[in-house]
Image (cartoon, rainbow, N blue to C red):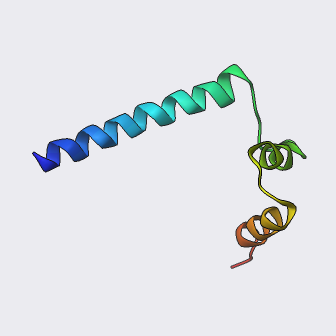
Amino acid sequence: MRQDDLYLGYYLHLVQDMCYRHFVYDKYHWNPMIPGNVESYFSTIGISSDEQEKIKAKHTKSF
């Protein structure tokens, strides 16, 4: 029974992700590659400038 619940949760997550992507990318044509779009998105959802800098630093570290 637990395994069935896990599968159901997994598939529900896939449906949720598909709906989100359709809403953001197809319906509103949001493109994260356009300069300023990510910062605008962060401010819309309430991420402060300091937190934005931490996120940028985390994702731009060279390996």
Q: Whole-percent x and y of residue 16?
A: 46, 33
Place residue 63 in its image quadrant.
bottom right
- Vertical order, 6 against 53 (above or below): above
Image quarter of residue 8: top left
* Residue at the image position 62 percent from the left and 25 percent from the top: 23
**Furthest residue to the bottom?**
63
Residue 59 in the image, given as x and y percentages of width and height: 71, 67
Instruction: Look at 59% across and 32% down and name the residue there.
Output: 21
Query: How many numbered marks have been drawn onto this rendered protein structure?
Result: 0
The image shows residue 46, relative to residue 29, as above or below, that is below
Between 59 and 12, the one lying in front of the other is 12
| Image position of 32 with respect to 54: above or below | above
Residue ranking furthest to the top:
27
Q: Residue furthest right?
A: 36
Determine the residue positioned at 67% across, 30% down. 24
> What is the x, y in percent for residue 62?
74, 77
Q: Residue at x 36, y 35 (%)?
A: 12
Q: Is residue 54 left or right of residue 8?
A: right
Of 23 and 34, which appears nearest the observer? Answer: 23
Q: Classify residue 54 by image quadrant.
A: bottom right
Image quadrant holding the N terminus, namely top left
Is 35 on the left-hand or right-hand side of 11? right
Residue 57 location, x and y as percent? 78, 72
**In the image: residue 3, left or right of residue 24:** left
